[in-house]
Image: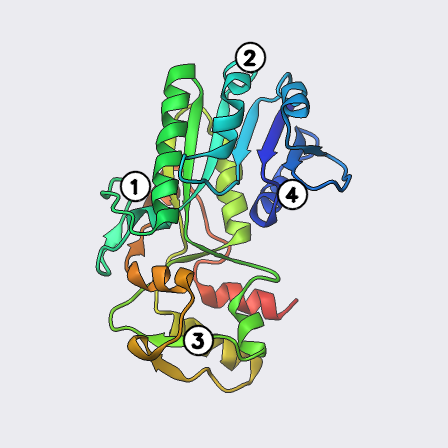
Amino acid sequence: MNSLLIFGYGYTSAYIAASLDKDQWSIIGTTRSSQSQTNIIQYNKEQIHKALEAVTHIIISIPPVAEGDLALGEFKELLSAAINLKWIGYLSSSSVYGNHYGAWVDENTKLIPLSERAKNRVLAEKQWLDFGGQNNININIFRLAGIYGPGRNVLELVKVRRAKSILQEGHCFSRIHVEDIANVVKIAIGNNAISEIYNVADNYPCPTYEVNDFAAELLGVEAPPMIKLTEAVLSPMAKEFYADNKKVSNHKIKTQLAVKLKYPTFREGLKSLIAK
């Protein structure tokens, strides 16, 4: 029986956990909440030390800070001493690539992170890769594109007229359905003999207004009006989003992991969501 510990049991990691065969996997996650849940432990040294006695695989789904990864910073000694641990998957972000002016990026592209969040991701990736090399543990880095899925998608925004269609010439954004993330990670866990970095994105990077227009069409409502970037009122995070411009290649997950995306573009993904 494999034993998986998930640091930061949330939206994406819950889908990953659900994708794994319960007859072959024992799964626990961490929380800082005081609420008691089945298969969820408190994020503290005592409970994590106990869990690590049997853990074979770990997924990290906690946003990093300026010092890098929180779990590694707090529990490095415990992790180094975990005798059964053989694989760690780190859920990173395609924001690490920064701005490539609309060009395609792959796992070998130079990282030029612009935002503090992206810089923190780059540092955390390096820390985990270094840790794996020092402890003979295979590390997989998953650079996730924009995540969407049930309850978290543009349909919800278009319904309440909160979606913004911003015109910035040549700007593209890559995205990925949460179920496809879960499948990629599931396949990679089964291929844990090597350390690798994987982009996790669908086949079709495109401007956000194209997605908004399609969502409005599915809902039978008016599409959000087009706004020039120079005229838009944006949050700091949205400004970071529009400062980056790249197309994220998924070639490696298709060739090395033989991944077949359930939702190859946003169209299939949104159609499935509106049908639920």
Of labels 4 and 2, earlier in sequence is 4
Q: Which residue is mark 1?
A: 107
- Residue nearest the observer in this picture, 41 or 139: 41
Please state which of the two labelled residues, at mark 3 or mark 1, is closer to the viewer. 3
- Mark 2 Cα within 10 Å, few/some/many (few <14, many 20+)? few
Left or right relative to 133: residue 169: left
Please state which of the two labelled residues, at mark 3 or mark 2, is closer to the viewer. 3
C-alpha distance separating marks 4 and 1 = 27 Å
Please state which of the two labelled residues, at mark 1 or mark 2, is closer to the viewer. 2
Residue most toward the front? 66
Image location of residue 228, percent across then percent down? 31, 79
- Residue nearest the observer in this picture, 170 or 182: 170
Image location of residue 136, percent across then percent down? 42, 16
Amino acid residing under circle 1: Glu
Q: In the rendering, which numbered label is found on residue 18?
A: 4
Image location of residue 275, percent across then percent down? 63, 69
Q: Which residue is mark 2?
A: 83
Of labels 4 and 1, earlier in sequence is 4
